[in-house]
Image (cartoon, helix red, strand yellow):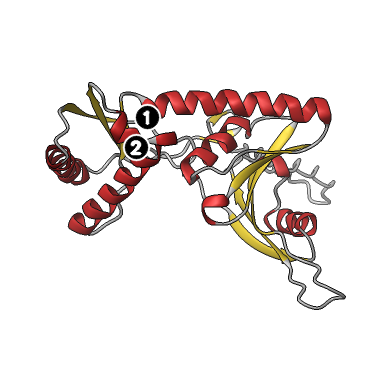
Amino acid sequence: MSNKVEVEVRAADVEAAIEEGLKKIGLSRSDVIIDVIDEGSRGLLGIGSRDAVVRLVGLSVTRPPRQPKAAPKPKTAVSPRKERKPKERKPAPPKKRVANDVVPDVIEADPEEKTVAFEMLETLLAKMNVTAVLDASVSEPDDMTGQKVHVFDVTGEDLGVLIGPRGETLNAIQYIMRLMVANQIEKRASFVIDVEGYRKRREQALTRLAERMAKKVVSRNRSVSLEPMPPHERRIIHMSLRSSDDVYTQSSGEGPRRKVQILPR
């Protein structure tokens, strides 16, 4: 099972905070997601200055198993009895790897969450006078956490009203529904609501955007900042480029203005 490593560091500037954080957790830039919480400020003549704050989240990178030390050669004994050569310890077998990451234990989706969410979403669509078909499925395990989640697909005609500009209406519906379901089952709800495959298309578009911007960063050797995105979309960018040897990503800004930066290594 993987252990998530996370540390928050303050320093005079962002780069100093990142370096200090990497030393604390013993990882390299390619092994972490860098989240710039506050870029800090020098103030005016030293007045009103504040430190930069960054959060580093480890990607659960597997470390190679330590090789056992060679058994020392037995010294020549004075006694006529032969000394037994100590047995060498065999190294533990390496954990299964996928793209340099430990495969996490699979966590199944909550069946109670599915039942409650399905009924609430059906009721909501009826009250909105939306004629649609509602299907439920279970996602593949998350690459980092191993968590499976319920996915509710809404299909029908003229459902753009449920998506809204840039998916804002859909995100709002999902947020409210999660709160309502969590309140009833008395624990966190993490299901996903999709309409006419919008989220899948958006994920594919963001992945292509990340790859295209990464090439631009490499060719220009200069960082690029993407437009502000909600947390789940920023995560798609981070995950798309986490295995890149040429660039790394970090988030900066606050609230709805948080965005992803792609930087050259």
Q: Pick out the residue farthest to the bottom.
A: 47
Q: CA distance from mark 2 to mark 1?
A: 6 Å
According to the picture, the residue beneath numbered tag 2 turns out to be 148
Q: How many marks?
A: 2
Whether residue 2 is visible here, answered yes or no, is: yes
The residue closer to the viewer here, 217 or 248, is 217
State which quadrant residue 193 falls in.
top left
- Residue at 17%, 37% in the rendered image: 125
Taking depth in this image into account, of 49 and 53 the one nearest to the observer is: 49
- State which quarter of the image contains the C terminus: top right
Give the image quarter of residue 152.
Answer: top left
Judge by depth and name the residue closer to the eye, 148 or 117: 117
Quadrant assignment, res 123: top left
- What amino acid is at disc 2? Lys
Where is residue 258? Give x, y as percent.
58, 50
Q: Residue at x 34, y 34 (%)?
A: 163
Residue 85 seen in render: no
**Residue 155 rendering spot, x and y as whole percentages:** 24, 24
Q: What secondary structure is marked by label 2? A: loop
**Residue position marked by numbered label 1 in the rendering:** 140
Label 2 Cα neighbours within 10 Å, binned few <14 / some 14-19 / many ≥20: some
Q: Earlier in the sequence, mark 2 or mark 1?
A: 1
Amino acid carrying mark 1 in the image: Glu
Q: Residue at x 23, y 21 (%)?
A: 157
Q: Position of residue 170 (x, y in %)?
A: 34, 38
The answer to the question of whether label 2 and label 1 lie on touching residues, with beta carbons closer than 8 A, is yes
Relative to 220, does residue 19 appear above or below in the rendering?
below
Determine whether, in the image, residue 104 is placed left or right of residue 228.
left
Q: What label sits on residue 218 in the rendered view?
A: none
